[in-house]
Image: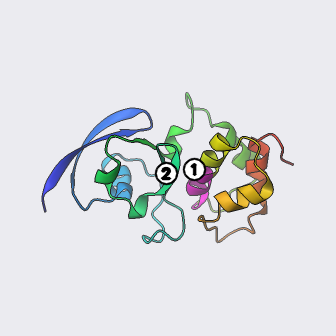
């Protein structure tokens, strides 16, 4: 399989990665860059555990070819913290008990982050819509929604 050299900007840092043309973004992030916060779930774009931001928009890394995002801004859950401190949204998930097993949490947080960037004070229906592509098998989503509301300053 022919390898290609990809120039990726991940969490604000440039990376040069040699990968086959069929390499998925998820594989490159986890296996080559060691960014294991992005989770491998369904491998078919159905669960949202692998959600990252590409140019600020949520994207499923398990169905995105790495070559298709060369030259774009890629953000993973690891990129949200600043100087080793959790972001406002990450802190809200922690404080509002928005995580259970934690497997879906990185994808949920990244989808919510994209929402909060475009809509700083979202309504509950907007939050539900933004998270509709992210599945959680542990909760009824109440604490997840409360976490996003808290990060937006209107939560419980």
Rendered location of residue 17, percent (x, y): 25, 44
- Quarter-wise, where is residue 33 in the image? top left
Label number found at residue 84: none
Q: Is residue 79 visible?
A: yes
The span shown in magenta is 103-111
- Residue that sits furthest to the left in the current view: 2
- Quarter-wise, where is residue 16 in the image? top left
- State which quarter of the image contains the N terminus: bottom left
Residue name at image x 38 percent, y 42 percent: 72
- Residue that sits furthest to the right in the current view: 156
Residue name at image x 50 percent, y 39 percent: 79
Residue name at image x 33 percent, y 40 percent: 71
- Quarter-wise, where is residue 91 in the image? top right
**Residue denoted by label 2:** 52
Of the residues under marks 2 and 1, which one precedes in the sequence? Answer: 2
Is 136 placed left or right of 75 in the picture?
Answer: right
Residue name at image x 33 percent, y 34 percent: 14
Q: Is residue 137 above or below residue 102?
A: below
Q: Is residue 82 magenta?
A: no
Label number found at residue 110: 1
Look at the numbered disc 1 and give the secondary structure of its residue. helix
Look at the numbered disc 2 and give the secondary structure of its residue. strand
- The answer to which of 59 and 14 lies nearer the viewer is 59
Distance of label 2 from label 1 (alpha carbons): 6 Å
- The answer to which of 132 and 88 lies nearer the viewer is 132
Mark 2 and mark 1 residues within 8 Å of each other at the beta carbon? yes
Q: Is residue 44 above or below residue 67?
A: below
């Amino acid at each position: 399989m022919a390898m290609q050299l990809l120039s990726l900007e991940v969490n604000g840092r440039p990376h040069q990665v040699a990968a086959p043309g069929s390499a998925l973004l998820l594989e490159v992030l986890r296996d080559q860059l060691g960014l294991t916060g992005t989770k491998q779930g369904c491998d078919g774009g159905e669960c949202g555990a692998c959600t990252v931001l590409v140019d600020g928009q949520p994207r499923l890394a398990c169905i995105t070819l790495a070559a298709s995002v060369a030259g774009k801004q890629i953000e993973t859950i690891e990129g949200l913290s600043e100087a080793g401190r959790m972001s406002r949204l990450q802190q809200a998930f922690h404080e509002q008990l928005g995580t259970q097993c934690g497997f879906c949490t990185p994808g949920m947080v990244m989808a919510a982050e994209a929402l909060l960037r475009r809509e700083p004070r979202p309504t509950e229906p907007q939050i539900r819509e933004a998270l509709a592509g992210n599945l959680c098998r542990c909760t009824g989503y109440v604490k997840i929604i409360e976490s996003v509301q808290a990060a937006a300053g209107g939560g419980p």
